[in-house]
């Protein structure tokens, strides 16, 4: 299992992690499928998480979620963590996971690694916090 601070954009489903759901955005439609962007975090970082279909209703603020075989990639020009077609998410608890809201891994500009173009490295921080879910303080 990895911490959110260690997720890197990739075109493969291999992320195994857990986090707490901090906030959900409004529901949208992707064709026939309902979607919802959420803010999730663990004790090391935060990230935007894409909920699809029934996931949009099944998970609520405060839920602790385990993601297996997840993917961190671009979805409509937004860098999001998601289960994808091969991944799985499940609720494993609620309200008892320490977390931080910065850095937000979705708010980092990533570029291909010069020594290995199939991997990405951080270029710069766009914003330390989520611009979609700004902090309440």
Image (cartoon, helix red, strand yellow):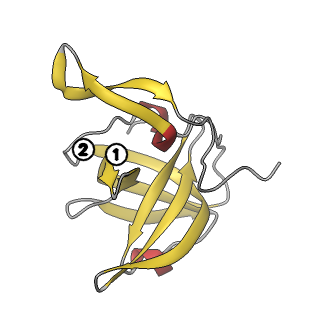
> Residue 69: x and y, percent?
26, 51
| Nearer to me, 7 or 88 | 7
Q: Residue at x 26, y 59 (%)?
A: 87
- Pick the quarter of the image with the N terminus: top left
81 left or right of 103? left
Q: Quadrant of residue 123?
A: top left
* Residue farthest toward the right in the current orientation of the protein: 137
| Nearer to me, 132 or 70 | 132
Q: Residue at x 60, y 47 (%)?
A: 130
Q: Count all numbered tags in the image, as a single digit.
A: 2
- Mark 2 closeness class: few <14, some 14–19, many ≥20 residues within 10 Å: some
> Residue 21: x and y, percent?
57, 59
Mark 2 — residue?
Answer: 14
Q: Is residue 6 above or below residue 81?
A: above
Instruction: Tell me, yes or no, whether the two marked residues, 2 and 1, touch with CB atoms within 8 Å.
Output: yes
Mark 1 — residue?
Answer: 16
Q: Residue at x 47, y 25 (%)?
A: 124
61 left or right of 86? right
Residue 112: mark in rendering? none
Q: Quadrant of residue 94?
A: bottom right
Q: Is residue 122 above or below residue 17?
A: above
């Amino acid at each position: 299992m990895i911490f959110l601070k260690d997720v890197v954009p990739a075109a493969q489903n291999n992320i195994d992690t857990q986090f707490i759901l901090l906030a959900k955005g409004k529901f949208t439609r992707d064709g026939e499928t309902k979607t919802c962007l959420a803010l999730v975090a663990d004790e090391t970082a935060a990230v935007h998480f894409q909920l699809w279909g029934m996931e949009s209703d099944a998970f609520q603020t405060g839920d602790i979620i385990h993601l297996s075989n997840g993917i961190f990639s671009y979805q409509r020009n937004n860098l999001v963590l998601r289960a994808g077609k091969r991944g799985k998410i499940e609720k494993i608890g609620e309200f008892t996971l320490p977390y931080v809201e910065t850095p937000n891994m979705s708010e980092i500009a990533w570029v291909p690694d010069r020594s290995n173009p199939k991997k990405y490295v951080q270029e710069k921080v766009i914003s330390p916090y989520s611009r979609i879910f700004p902090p309440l303080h």
